Image (cartoon, helix red, strand yellow):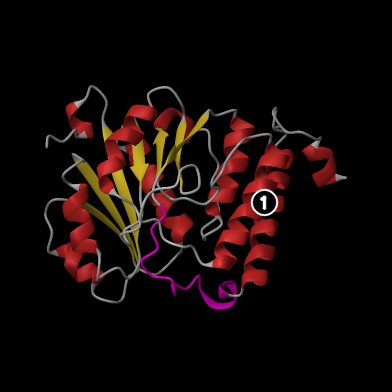
Amino acid sequence: MSTVKPGESNERWLVALPVYNEAAYVDGVLDEVLAYAGDVLVVDDGSTDGTSEILQAREDVQVIRHPKNRGYGAALQTAFQYTIDEGYDGIVTLDCDGQHQPKRIPRFIEAAKTVDIVSGSRYLKQYEGDSQPPQQRLVINRQITKQINEQLGIDLTDAFCGFKAYRTEGLKKLRITDDGYAMPLQLWVEAAAAGLSVRELPVPLIYLDLERSFGGSLDHAETRLRYYNQVIEQSLAAVCADGRTIPAARSSLCQNSLG
């Protein structure tokens, strides 16, 4: 089977993985990613379980290490800035816990030829062998995705999937500041405000670690849902405070946020 690597096209694409305490998966995932990616960046977000030592032993990937754990959103912000600073045409992001299939990287890059953001969706298509998602996570995902669609005038089926491709010119228009797991929600508000084009690609629904922690009180579903709603409200308020608008919004969001 032949592989299509981003570095073999006319464009330069980076593949980046935010990593925090993934010693059990990181080597295997990176070996697979490298079959489909020419340039790979790992953002080690302050791992303490031996992941950092595993990464130090590799010479086939770039590594940026945060001395302390700063959060999922912070790791992606580091990857975005690296993409811009190093002059890449785009970046593909995927998780390092085995839930995303690296063989799909070329499809994301191909789809990104005509849109600013390609976002994976675990609910756009059903695959044989799909996992059964934890019920609370499914309910929250559906509720937040519906809310995002209704407020921003977009049409998503999965607001949270971390498997994405971004064109760099679109990245430059995003003002991402959220360091946590809710960063994807700020992303959608910013993308809508910037008028970026979005396409979803179906990906299998894979859960390998059903007990994964979101950290502290966020492991409680109701607390997490309130936090997500707060991030959406704050992101909308930031857009309005900057004098920006969301053209596709189905209501006057800035009046609602500031009134």
In the image, residue 213 lies at what x, y percent? 47, 73
Please give the name of the residue rendered at 32% of the width and 53% of the height, measured from the top-left corner.
17
Please give the name of the residue rendered at 62% of the width and 70% of the height, measured from the top-left corner.
221
Q: Which residue is mark 1?
A: 232
The secondary structure type at the circle numbered 1 is helix
Quadrant of the rendering where the N terminus is positioned? top left
Specify whether residue 145 is in view: yes
Magenta range is: 205-219
In the image, residue 222 lies at what x, y percent? 67, 70
Left/right placement of residue 138 relative to residue 98 reads: right
Left/right placement of residue 212 relative to residue 106 reads: right
- Was residue 217 drawn as part of the magenta stretch in this picture? yes
Residue 166 location, quadrant: top left
Q: Is residue 193 above or below residue 205?
A: above
Specify whether residue 172 is in view: no
In the image, residue 115 lies at what x, y percent? 46, 26
In the image, residue 5 lies at what x, y percent? 19, 34
Quadrant of the rendering where the C terminus is positioned? top right
- Was residue 107 drawn as part of the magenta stretch in this picture? no
